Image (tube, rainbow, N blue to C red):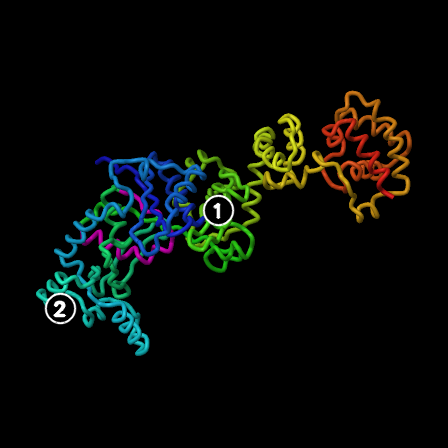
């Protein structure tokens, strides 16, 4: 018997920006498909018209592409199971809802929202159990189980609004396996008769995802833990349709938790603690509110992906840095944990720092030059590459480089008062005057030669490095900070170094 090909899907709803938890779900599906030489499908679940937000679908697609997550089938890419937007598959769902009605596994419900609310209030006030539409309460509601066939038909023909609900059997055990969580069972008495087809004629997630997963030959459903309570209903739907043997394997991923581990990570947590929870910046089309993204915050996509992969998955080794190809080789659902994964924003920055160090200084210079030009400075790539090489180990992001390198482009006009009081000694001006005399003789004017001459100078005049090097640093930078002073001097060049020292000696009193 031929083994079924691995086919997985990521099925987001365009109801807002993609949370990093959604990105991780897509990533795990992508890695799993890649490892097993399978197919990764992108399917847009856009049947919830009330919550649909314009621009959300294009945001999802752009975010996945930025992360380097590509799909074999999906909107814009085609495939054997088109269309891949559920809003375009209405006729398909109508066919399968008819099958459920004919087999007695679904029924029409004509209850108004007010009637349903009254039912729930009654159950709560009388402490009768779960306030839901289920095997007991449905007997007292307005549906095709309590109405005669003629009354049901008349209501449908007259245009009365209705939904179609799943007929959940009473007091049965639903058994299913989860690759991450093992064998599970749920009693149907705890389940409600979920709506399968809404009053607008579009299916809910429960019907659409089961039908589409079956028709698209999905082998594994890898999704967030929040869908675990819905899985018993989905298992029942596979049984109702007679698809038990083709049912996919399930794997429900752990939650991504707040940094303190107390609850699911939310947009508010990011705003409160100062880090993004979305891959890209998102502007709410209704309110105009802007939420920051990892891309706009300066993260490299590889660092972002590496960070997300380790939120829930453990490679079983001490290794932390993985290329996407390495992740595909190493990834397994068996090494995904059940417990929620605590998000650590400092660790995310650490990953970005590691990827920044791995990149060539010239490649980083291509990004940094945009910032330099915005500051109205021009510089050659060769010189900027030297500057980047000096400061990149001091930053987590390219945009932080300006604070570490501004003095290469702008000579100090003022000098840090606290530093002067602490570091500028009485002998400093005299020593720097003598240094000015020897600068013209340094040839070539590079870091090794500057170092040699300054060392000779300190020995000859019995000057400590603390006084000389700090004095030079204050003159050239305006403060006692920055990379190796000899490297700074070499990049600035002889004329600029002399000019800055002379200015400092005239200005500092």
Please give the name of the residue rendered at 33% of the width and 41% of the height, measured from the top-left corner: 42
Q: Which residues are magenta?
A: 218-241
The majority secondary structure of the magenta stretch comes to helix
**Cα distance between the residues tagged 1 and 2:** 52 Å
Q: In the image, is 482 to the left or to the right of 177?
A: right
Which element carries disc 2, helix, strand or loop? loop
Relative to 362, does residue 138 appear above or below in the rendering? below
Specify the quadrant that holds the C terminus. top right
144 or 239, which is in the foreground? Answer: 144
- Mark 1 and mark 2 lie on one chain; the one further toward the N terminus is 2
Q: In the image, is 430 to the left or to the right of 163?
A: right
Label 1, on which residue? 281
Residue 328 sits in quarter: top left
Whether residue 319 is visible here, answered yes or no, is no
Circle 2: is it few (<14), some (14-19), or many (20+) Cα within 10 Å?
A: some
Q: Position of residue 479 (x, y in %)?
A: 76, 42
Q: Which mark is residue 147?
A: 2
Query: Is 127 a magenta residue?
Result: no
């Amino acid at each position: 018997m031929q083994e079924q090909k691995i086919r997985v899907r990521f099925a987001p709803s365009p109801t807002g920006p993609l949370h990093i938890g959604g990105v991780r779900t897509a990533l795990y599906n992508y890695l799993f498909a890649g490892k097993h030489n399978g197919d990764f499908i992108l399917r847009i679940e856009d049947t919830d018209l009330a919550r649909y937000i314009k621009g959300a679908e294009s945001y999802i697609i752009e975010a996945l592409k930025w992360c380097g997550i590509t799909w074999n089938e999906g909107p814009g890419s085609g495939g054997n199971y088109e269309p891949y937007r559920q809003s375009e598959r209405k006729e398909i769902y109508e066919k399968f809802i008819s099958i459920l009605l004919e087999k007695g596994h679904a029924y029409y419900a004509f209850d108004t929202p007010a009637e349903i609310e009254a039912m729930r209030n009654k159950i709560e006030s009388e402490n009768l159990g779960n306030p839901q539409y289920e095997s007991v309460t449905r007997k007292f509601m307005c549906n095709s189980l309590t109405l005669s066939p003629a009354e049901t038909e008349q209501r449908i023909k007259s245009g009365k609004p209705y939904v179609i609900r799943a007929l959940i059997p009473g007091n049965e055990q639903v058994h299913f396996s989860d690759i991450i969580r093992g064998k599970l069972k749920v009693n149907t008495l705890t389940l409600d008769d979920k709506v399968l087809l809404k009053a607008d004629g579009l299916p809910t997630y429960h019907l659409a995802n089961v039908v589409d997963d079956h028709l698209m030959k999905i082998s594994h459903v890898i999704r967030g833990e929040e869908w675990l309570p819905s899985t018993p209903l989905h298992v029942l739907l596979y049984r109702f349709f007679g698809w038990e043997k083709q049912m996919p394997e399930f794997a429900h991923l752990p939650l991504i938790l707040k940094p303190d581990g107390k609850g699911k990570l939310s947009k508010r947590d990011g705003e409160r603690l100062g880090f993004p929870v979305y891959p890209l910046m998102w502007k709410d089309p209704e309110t105009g509110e802007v939420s920051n993204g990892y891309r706009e915050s300066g993260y490299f996509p590889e660092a972002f992906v590496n960070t997300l992969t380790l939120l829930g998955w453990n490679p079983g080794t001490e290794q932390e840095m993985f290329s996407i190809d390495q992740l595909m080789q190493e990834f397994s659902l068996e090494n995904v944990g059940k417990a929620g994964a605590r998000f650590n924003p400092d660790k995310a920055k650490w990953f970005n720092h590691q990827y920044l160090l791995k990149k060539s200084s010239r490649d980083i210079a291509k990004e940094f030059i945009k910032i330099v030009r915005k500051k109205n400075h021009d510089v050659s790539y060769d010189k900027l590459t030297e500057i980047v090489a000096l400061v990149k180990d001091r930053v987590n992001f390219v945009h932080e480089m300006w604070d570490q390198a501004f003095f290469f482009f702008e000579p100090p006009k003022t000098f840090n008062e606290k530093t002067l009081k602490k570091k500028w000694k009485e002998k400093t001006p005299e020593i720097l005057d003598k240094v000015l005399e020897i600068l013209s003789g340094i040839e070539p004017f590079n870091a090794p030669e500057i170092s040699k001459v300054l060392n000779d100078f300190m020995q000859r005049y019995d000057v400590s490095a603390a006084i000389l090097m700090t004095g030079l640093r204050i003159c050239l930078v305006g403060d006692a900070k920055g990379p190796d002073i000899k490297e700074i001097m070499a990049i600035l060049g002889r004329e600029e170094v002399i000019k800055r020292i002379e200015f400092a000696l005239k200005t500092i009193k």
